[in-house]
Image (cartoon, rainbow, N blue to C red):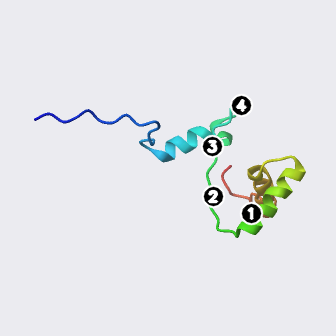
Amino acid sequence: MTRPPAKVRFASRPGDPDSWIKAADAPPTGKGAGEAFTARLTIDITPELRGRIKVAAFRRGITVAAMMRELLDGEFPPTEGDQP
């Protein structure tokens, strides 16, 4: 007996989600490989705090991601001996 053909789906999941996410984060500029790679950071916050963060970013005219990068970079500056 033969099997029916596999159903074609509207969208398929990527085979390797990590590479798919990293590829989407790559900036279009000609920066070096060390500057181009970013990593995701997941934190648990309340919906109310999330809303306040989004409003603050909107008022500043930047994305939430850019605002959080600035905040974290200021809070945790590079120290001597860290690799760039």
Q: Nearer the viewer, residue 5 or 79?
A: 5
Is disc 1 in contact with disc 2, using a CB cutoff of under 8 Å? no
> In the displayed image of the protein, which residue is found farthest to the right?
59
Q: Which mark is residue 37?
A: 3
Q: In this figure, what is the number of numbered marks?
A: 4
Q: How far apart, in angstroms, are the residues tagged by discs 2 and 3? A: 13 Å
Describe the element under mark 1 as helix, strand or loop: helix
Residue type at mark 1 is Arg
Describe the element under mark 4 as helix, strand or loop: loop
On screen, residue 37 versus residue 72, left or right, reads: left
Q: How far apart, in angstroms, are the residues tagged by discs 3 and 1? A: 25 Å
| Relative vertical location of residue 77 with respect to residue 11 in this rendering, above or below | below
Residue of label 4: 29
Q: Residues within 10 Å of mark 3 (few under 14, many from 20)?
A: few
Q: Which mark is residue 64?
A: none
Residue type at mark 2 is Leu
Is disc 4 in contact with disc 1, using a CB cutoff of under 8 Å? no
Residue of label 2: 41
Residue of label 1: 50
